[in-house]
Image (tube, rainbow, N blue to C red):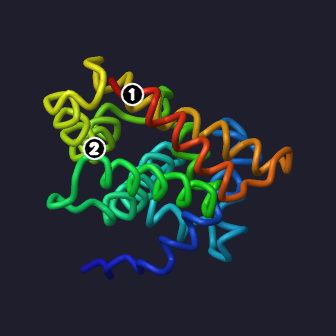
Amino acid sequence: MARPKDDSKIEVIFEATLKIVLKTGFNGLKMADVAKAAGLATGTLYIYFKNKEVLINELFLSLKTAKTHRLLSVYNAKDSFEVNFRNLWFNYLELSLTEPERMLFIEQFAHTSFLTKKTKALGDELLKPLEEFLQQGIKQKKVRKLPIQLLLSQLMGPIYEIVKLHMDKKIVMNKSMKEGLYEIALRGISI
């Protein structure tokens, strides 16, 4: 009987993969390099992930699941739309600024052919609570009646660009900048 997989090894593999793939891209990713960076034998890596495609798909889903759960942790159904929108927007910005590599990886692979249809579907499913939240805003006539995917891209896309500027040290975010960006985001989707 096979031994269960060690979750701590999976985390080490994911961290090594994340660092490598952000430097080399998918095509430059080699399983031997991941194993070396993770401090494992290459054969051990293949026990956990049969190839780099499986590794990328599982890493993507793991990162997106963790980020989405952390994002939604500030949502409270008892709060008003405005309070929840503010909390969700600022939480997404802070999560992205705090863990830019994870956000970049998710954004880099979200719309590529490297992910399987199943992984994309599972990733999309994670966003259902946000989609429902925006639908409520539309019903309450607080949010423009546009396709939800456009609204999400309008909200998340600018944060992606902000984080890249921040990472490149072209801009250092401060509280007043964050507040100004929040106001732009809110006005961008509000009726």
In the image shown, does 128 or 85 lie closer to the viewer?
85
- Determine whether, in the image, residue 157 is placed left or right of residue 66: right
Mark closer to the chain start, 2 or 1: 2
Residue type (three-letter) at the residue carrying disc 2: Leu
In the image shown, does 106 or 50 lie closer to the viewer?
106
Number of residues whose C-alpha sits closer than 10 Å to that of mark 2, classed few (under 14), some (14–19) or many (20 or more) = some
Residue type (three-letter) at the residue carrying disc 1: Ile
Which circle marks residue 189 in the picture? 1
CA gap between label 2 and label 1 equals: 14 Å
Which residue sits at x=58%, y=46%?
105
Number of residues whose C-alpha sits closer than 10 Å to that of mark 1, classed few (under 14), some (14–19) or many (20 or more) = many
- Tell us which disc is closer to us: 2 or 1: 1
Outermost top residue: 146
The residue tagged 2 is: 130
Q: Position of residue 118 (x, y in %)?
A: 28, 37
Q: Is residue 35 above or below residue 141?
A: below
Specify the quadrant that holds the C terminus.
Answer: top left
Q: Count numbered badges in the picture.
A: 2
- Determine whether, in the image, residue 134 is placed left or right of residue 36: left
Describe the element under mark 2 as helix, strand or loop. helix
- Determine whether, in the image, residue 174 is placed left or right of residue 70: right
